[in-house]
Amino acid sequence: MALDFLAGCAGGAAGVLVGHPFDTVKVRLQVQSVSNPKYRGTIHCFQSIIKQESALGLYKGIGSPMMGLTFINAFVFGVQGNALRYLDNDTPLNQFLAGASAGAIQCVICCPMELAKTRMQLQGTGEYKSKSKTYKNSLDCLLKIHKKEGLRGINRGMVSTLLRETPSFGFYFLTYDYLTRYLSCEISDSYIIPKLLFAGGMSGIVSWLSTYPIDVIKSRLQADGVGGVNNYNGIIDCVQKSYQVEGWRVFTRGLTSTLLRAFPVNAATFATVTLFLMYMRSENNINECESGPAIQQANSM
């Protein structure tokens, strides 16, 4: 369990550093006004942020995920690894169930973290400009939301987060397990690193594609009220109003930047976690497991 925790921390930090700029672009595109859009697409959004806010603008709100991922990845990889060992049968269904359980549990931390990240990423932009609601950092953001709205405020979007994370993490770990087996990722393989990077990257893409429309709704609910006006009464209301105004394409808003981010982020995360667990195994354990899928060897600790 301790090694699962440490591996998750290392993988999470690597993933955040690689992927946060793409996440900033995703959120900006997801919540911009359809009647007066500020960005024409993913590339234009990247260019505009760098031009107007410098490259550091792409890392707005990074404090929240960087702090939260220490715990989130500990939960995700710790719960997934232990759930898989508890199920005692490494089948595709159990891989999905173990991943889904990990995704559900980490929502307790993920939801407030993403709320702060979203508010920070939108702060001072377009319709979200507001002198009276300026956050110094992610912690200050959560404290101010809690002071004004209480626990319910900092858990805004919890149901949509749960609906997104539970199945997506199931597909996440299932895809990674399948690909590492298919690619025969073994410790002795000289190409193990590119294979792990490919498996991790594809796992991230499959995971996001499985629940992306829910992520759009979650972002809109968490951004709602920033300008002082609440537009949505809940998930169903948000879905209906978003569809009525923008059509079905609204549920794919920001998908390009998300998928561009998903591959490198999850490639870095999964490869770091797997290699870390392999490295930390004792020499005797390595000798006992010289063949077989890398992820299976890592989870067998």
Image (cartoon, rainbow, N blue to C red):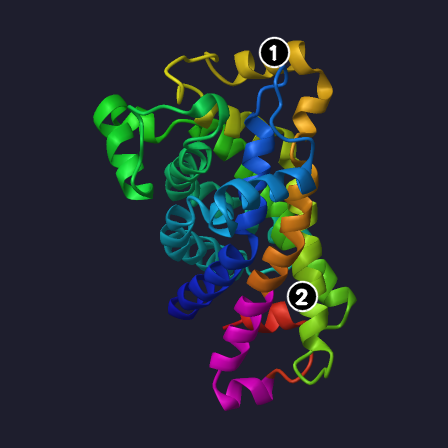
159 sits to left or right of 247: left
The label number, if any, that marks residue 295 in the structure image? none
| Residue 15 vs residue 45, the one in the foreground | 45
Q: How many marks?
A: 2
SS of the residue under disc 1: helix
Within the image, what quadrant is residue 209 found in? top right
Q: Residues within 10 Å of mark 2 (few under 14, many from 20)?
A: many
Within the image, what quadrant is residue 294 found in? bottom right
Give the residue at mark 2: 197
Q: Residues within 10 Å of mark 1 (few under 14, many from 20)?
A: few
What residue is drawn where x is 46% and y is 32%?
Answer: 122
Magenta includes 274? yes
Mark found first going from the N terminus, 1 or 2 = 2
Tell me residue 143's x, y (percent): 24, 35
Distance from the alpha carbon under mark 1 to that under mark 2: 39 Å
Residue 127, compared with residue 108, is above or below; it is above
Tell me residue 277's x, y (percent): 51, 74
137 sits to left or right of 169: left
| Residue 277 vs residue 137, the one in the foreground | 137
Q: Hey, what amino acid is under mark 1?
A: Gln
Residue found at the very far left of the displayed protein? 147
Tell me residue 74's x, y (percent): 41, 58
Residue 97 in view here: no
Give the residue at mark 1: 240
Q: Are marks 1 and 2 in contact (CB under 8 Å)?
A: no
What residue is drawn where x is 31% and y is 43%?
Answer: 137
Q: Which residues are magenta?
A: 271-288
Magenta stretch: dominant SS? helix
